[in-house]
Image (cartoon, grey):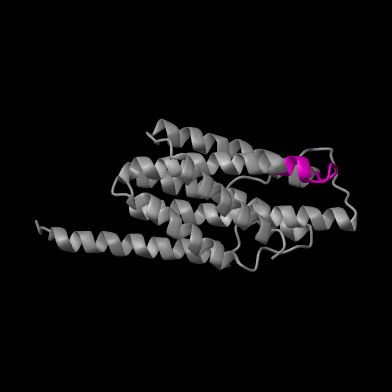
Amino acid sequence: MKVINPFIKYVRTMIDRLLTTADSALRTMFASHPGSQPCPTLPGDATELSDIEKKESGALMRVNHVGEVCAQALYTAQALATNNEALRTHFLKASAEETDHLAWTEKRLKELDDRPSFLNPFWYAGAFAIGLLAGRLGDKVSLGFVVETENQVEAHLDSHLNKLPAGDHASRAIVAQMKDDEARHAVNAKDLGAIDLPLPVKGLMMVAGKVMTTVAHRI
């Protein structure tokens, strides 16, 4: 039986991971996303919006779409950084689940005759760098970052439920389902051993999130 040199095996593994990471980035940025789950709907509640309401819903859903672009980057980077195969599988599974959110927000933007953020490559690169840094600081820190990120995203989505036009039932159904899913992801990360991040770190994450949401609302 031929024995594979450990170094060669390591190099092959890293090349495979890097190719997977690059493929994920390209798919997030340039591919369409059908999603594995149907888009949430509220049967019997037709969405009828004025032009002003459509514009506001479009801006809010663009922000949510950016959030899902960032989620893809974060989970992909964290999967690349960890040496724990079980945790890597967890991150990739979470990324796949977030792809549904990406598909739903993308579809809703088209229905609202609106567009994604022009800065999506920038958002992706920034989120990927943050996720890679968190991953390099250790698995418990990386998971702690997931918990805090998902908690902040959940609060952000809750605020959107108050801001979306009351008659935009389609967008509200999507945001409500996303909010539930993000809460579950936070609980899963905590169960896997996440640490509680220091308050200054949480504060910086909140500031970064505020900058992203403010800019993406317009650009």
| 163 in magenta | yes
In the rendered view of the protein, which quadrant contains the C terminus?
bottom right
| 171 in magenta | no
Residue nearest the observer in this picture, 21 or 162: 162
Q: Quadrant of residue 5?
A: bottom left
Residue nearest the observer in this picture, 38 or 154: 154
The answer to whether any part of residue 169 appears in the image is yes
- As displayed, is residue 110 above or below residue 162? below
- As displayed, is residue 206 above or below residue 177? below
Identify the residue at image location x=61%, y=49%. Answer: 101
Q: Residue 54, how many percent across, how many down?
A: 83, 55
Q: Give the extent of the magenta segment.
A: 160-168
Q: Residue 166, how many percent across, how many down?
A: 84, 41
Residue nearest the observer in this picture, 18 or 130: 130
Q: Quadrant of residue 133?
A: bottom left
The answer to whether any part of residue 34 appears in the image is no
Q: Residue 77, how many percent across, how many down?
A: 41, 56
In the rendered view of the protein, which quadrant contains the N terminus?
bottom left
